[in-house]
Image (tube, grey):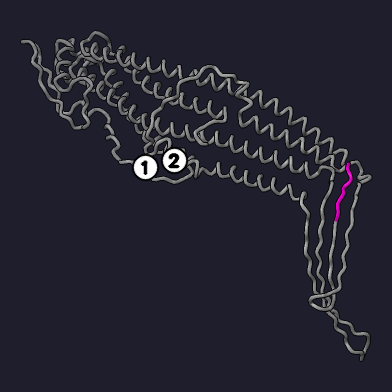
Amino acid sequence: MRNTTERQLGLRAPNAPRVLGRAAACLLLAALGAPGQTSTSTNTTWASAVNVPPGTATVVVPPSAADMSTPAIPPPDTTPPKTRLTWEQCVRIALAHNPDLEVFRDDVLNSDANRRGSYALLYPQIALTFGATRNYDRPGFGAPSNYSNEFTGQVSLTQTIFNGFLTQGNIAQARAELALAFANLDAQKALSSYDLKTAFAQVVYAQEDVAVARRVIDVNQQNARLVKLLYDSGNEDQGAYELTRANLDQSIFVYDQAVRNVEVSDEQLVTILGQDVPRPLVAIGELATAPLSTKPDFRALAVQTPAYFQHRAEVDAAAAGITIAQAAFYPTLGVDATAERGGEFLLPRQVNATAGVTVTYNLFDGGANYFNVRAARASLLAALASLRSGTDNAQLALAQDFKALVDAVENQRIQEELLDATQLRYTIAEGEYRTALISFQDFNDITSAYVAQLQTTLSAKQSAVNAEAAWEEARGLGAIP
């Protein structure tokens, strides 16, 4: 009657032999394999007998009963990597091939060329002109036709003496635009360094995540075998057995997902590098951060960021715009000289030379110059306000990123302590469950906490590295020089 009731309630397997307790089943499991040792083959034969006291039934597990009833374990990926990359190698490749950096380097070259060209009006402008003309003239019907040739050669020189400080304004504005281009390049270097560091950390994380997922499979496989043995011997219910199988199946899915994540992470890193490298690749490194410094002066750091220099260059360009706009209120003074030769021969001898001074003053233009100056002054005020706002925002971002970095590093330390504690607790709970000192519910909860903590600790390491990368970017620093 008791055996029938146990089978109906799911406490024992339908054909399980009767035993006195869980101890004999645990002895059988110990004979088959020590704790923590799992078979890498799904065809392992589990068949053994345990010497038990006289009068006690012998538990015999059919061949491969545990393994045949559990999901297939995927074999470890043994594909050799085609590319091994260190952090230093990634920095060198990105410095030479990252397309975003190339864009801003070309912008610097463009701005530098414009700056050099702004000095042109400080030098004389010289032009050489040569012309040849053939004339045809026929006075009337029957009159002979007349042909004549005319050759001209002219050299002209023009020099601007004063143009209302327009040239100086253009030079100052070109210098400001070059400074802005350099600031934009520094900001892009910091951003590319952030992207590269987080992408490299993602590859390292993905690689370690595969190892963590494999460890979780081993834990759940070992638990599934233990519970299956206890279930077959009538010492555990079917719900516990089905739950351990589901946990193992889920861990296999997580493992497959982690393997696929490695491929995506490799593609992300290659995109940041800007150079195609053979895949699969291996990132040689670890998820670690540098020691934390003391709390810095965020205001002092804010005025050293690329964002500050960008706004400062915009202020200088706007100030130069006022000088350019005001140039229309001043007269323009220039000198010019021209030497010309002309005649009917290729090397004419007739010489004509002129020289003079030109003064130009615009009396009235409908108020355009006045409003241009007002617009330039408004642009300067807007740039100054943007400078103040940008500096304040940079200071706030620095404070936030530093806090996030401290929090992430401290969280990593705490999660590592929790991992040590949950691992020790799992080891103790495994032994207690084998000897029936704790229930399956408690053992499953402890195992779930340990498995979850493995992933949480790895994620905390990655978050710390990402926070460090964000802190470096906020300061305009990074691995890319």
Name above or below for residue 338 compared with residue 305.
below
Residue 109 is left or right of residue 130, and the answer is left
Q: Is residue 270 magenta?
A: no
Name above or below for residue 352 compared with residue 345.
above
Secondary structure category for the residue under label 2: helix
Mark 1 and mark 2 residues within 8 Å of each other at the beta carbon = no
Q: Residue at x 64, y 40 (%)?
A: 181
Q: Residue at x 62, y 43 (%)?
A: 108
Q: Residue at x 78, y 45 (%)?
A: 167
x then y, percent, for residue 58: 10, 17
Residue 373 is left or right of residue 207, and the answer is right
Q: Which residue is mark 2?
A: 267
Could you say which quadrant of the image residue 424 lies in?
top left
Q: Which residue is mark 1?
A: 83
Residues in magenta? Answer: 329-335
Residue 368 is left or right of residue 444, and the answer is right
x then y, percent, for residue 469: 50, 28
Label 1 vs label 2: CA separation? 13 Å
Among all residues in the image, which is located at the extreme left? 54
* Between 4 and 171, the one nearer to me in the picture: 171
Amino acid on which the number 1 mark rests in the picture: Thr
Mark 1 and mark 2 lie on one chain; the one further toward the N terminus is 1
Residue 418 is left or right of residue 322, and the answer is left
x then y, percent, for residue 467: 50, 25
Mark 2 surroundings: few (<14), some (14-19) or many (≥20) residues within 10 A: some
Amino acid on which the number 2 mark rests in the picture: Glu
Could you say which quadrant of the image residue 326 lies in?
top right
Mark 1 surroundings: few (<14), some (14-19) or many (≥20) residues within 10 A: few
Q: Which mark is residue 133?
A: none
Q: Is residue 194 visible?
A: no
* Between 453 and 124, the one nearer to me in the picture: 124
